[in-house]
Image (cartoon, coloured by chain):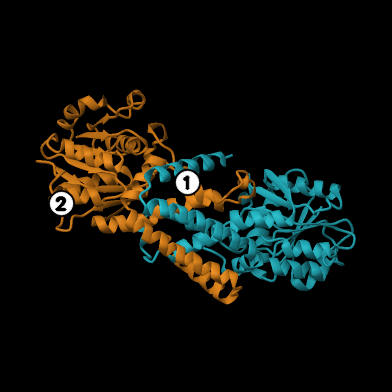
Chain colours: A orange, B cyan
Amino acid sequence: MIYAIIGLGIMGGSVAKAIRSNIIGHEDPDGKIFALDKNNESLFAALTSGIIDRAFTPSETKDLLGQADMIFICLYPAATLDFLREHKGDFKDGAIITDISGVKHDLAAALDKDEIRPANAHLILGHPMAGGEKEGFAASKGEYFLNHNYILIKPKGGYEDEAAVEIFRKIIRGMGFTRITEVDADTHDNKIGFTSQLCHVVASAMVESAGDPEITSFGGGSFEDLTRIAMINAPLWTELFLANREKLVAHIENFESQLDNLKKLIETQDANGLQSLLADVRQKRIAMQR
Amino acid sequence: MIYAIIGLGIMGGSVAKAIRSNIIGHEDPDGKIFALDKNNESLFAALTSGIIDRAFTPSETKDLLGQADMIFICLYPAATLDFLREHKGDFKDGAIITDISGVKHDLAAALDKDEIRPANAHLILGHPMAGGEKEGFAASKGEYFLNHNYILIKPKGGYEDEAAVEIFRKIIRGMGFTRITEVDADTHDNKIGFTSQLCHVVASAMVESAGDPEITSFGGGSFEDLTRIAMINAPLWTELFLANREKLVAHIENFESQLDNLKKLIETQDANGLQSLLADVRQKRIAMQR
């Protein structure tokens, strides 16, 4: 099997590394990994370290797509849509194509309207729920995926080809992911708007409200853990926040009203109300542990 | 030297363990650790595992205080104040006494008014900036303190006895803490209201706004990291939030206005404004790394 990675950044690089060590190292010893990037340094680093078998530059895209059996498009959301639109006729027959976009609305709508549906191949929209706050191939790690969640977007009318999805699920599990959740694009965007985007917004607001750059000399871990994700990739998250703005704003407003409720209990010194709310928080959060 | 721990919970237990392995194991081989708790199970566990040398019940408090050279009062804030008020005449001459309260206003005020100033001993208010979200001796770990911050409360008129403070700093470093910051009670409460209390309020509001108990199947780590501290000890944090309510409410409101600013940029689709704010967040947060 030939695995193609389009975009060898932190996510594409991590996909390549996880496939290299967990799949090619085991079930698919003859597998090859090809990667395409506009950044020659990333390609060179991946090639010389033995992570990928062949490097392609953007002008060789068609050549790569004509050979690949499993394609991971690891680009920003808008670039992913453009790539799929431009290359929908370039995939090998029977290929499985996936993406890693953090917002699915536009992609799912374009797929519904057949604007990005590949001719004789299978496009399965997906979202690996893992990564780090850094960027670029140098920050990639196959271990990011271990025991993490993967979300697959199941079209409202069901999968076009269940057999292709099953092959893809096997690859996902091979990469180290342990829980695969399959939902429609709208559910994905709503849940991710909460677990991922709202958290990044909250962490960013925390950092902005810190004032003192030396504040961490008063830290015991809480502020540091809460704001680690605020070492944010500004262009990517701007795109994600805006692409999911309606759902995200609704989550921010719901959070604001919960925060306001807590603030009122503190302001009015309602010890019983506060303690009972915090006991509820504790119980809910413990129930979320797995 | 006889070290006394008053209250053998997660913090008191961790203090005992850190002294046992890092100080008695090294610089003070003849040191002894005595502990007092109302919970006999904790005392028994600490005694049989060799963490403490002698166990005391509350009725034996005076006996313990009459012997101890260094006393860590590891109780909740209001109980700490009561303990100091009740026992200010019971300490050994020259003893060093400290507390671990997360809010210092009331203690510092009582010390200023000589309500809790020990007769011939040195009370140094302090705050070890470390711990876990669990409770009790069973959850204690000496390693919690490694490379963490410790805050000492320096009275406005300076320390009463610099030599006693220097002995205490040496013990703190011996326990594994690497950065000691010395400020007045007001500065402490203001900074901690941000790094610790605001973070706990925000994490609690996040959990309350989650709605779906299965939300973590859509998590990639951000929500989990941000809300780990929401497995909160409700009685303790109710006390802390209320004791520092004015400063905490001001921090909540500052955070709310930063959050609102982010929300407006998203709502109005101001891509440039959003990207420039996120770039600022990133730069600030990276500068906070040490």
Question: Which secondary structure lies at badge 1?
Answer: helix
Q: Residue A259 appears at what percent x and percent y?
A: 49, 64
Query: Residue at position x 71%, y 46% from top?
Result: B180
Picture quarter containing residue A70? top left
Residue topped by disc 2: A112
Please state the chain letter of the residue tagged with numbered disc 1 in the rendered image: A
Chain of the residue under label 2: A
- Around disc 2, counting alpha carbons within 10 Å, would you say few (fewer than 14), some (14 to 19), or many (20 or more)? few
Answer with mark 1 or mark 2, whichever residue precedes in sequence: 2
What's the amino acid at mark 2? Asp
B288, above or below B207, in the image: above
Which image quadrant is residue A7 in? top left
What amino acid type should be assigned to the residue bearing mark 1?
Answer: Ala
Question: Residue A171: x percent and y percent?
Answer: 25, 43
The image shows residue A174, relative to residue A270, as above or below, that is: above
Residue A186 shown left or right of residue B196 in the figure: left
Residue under label 1:
A230
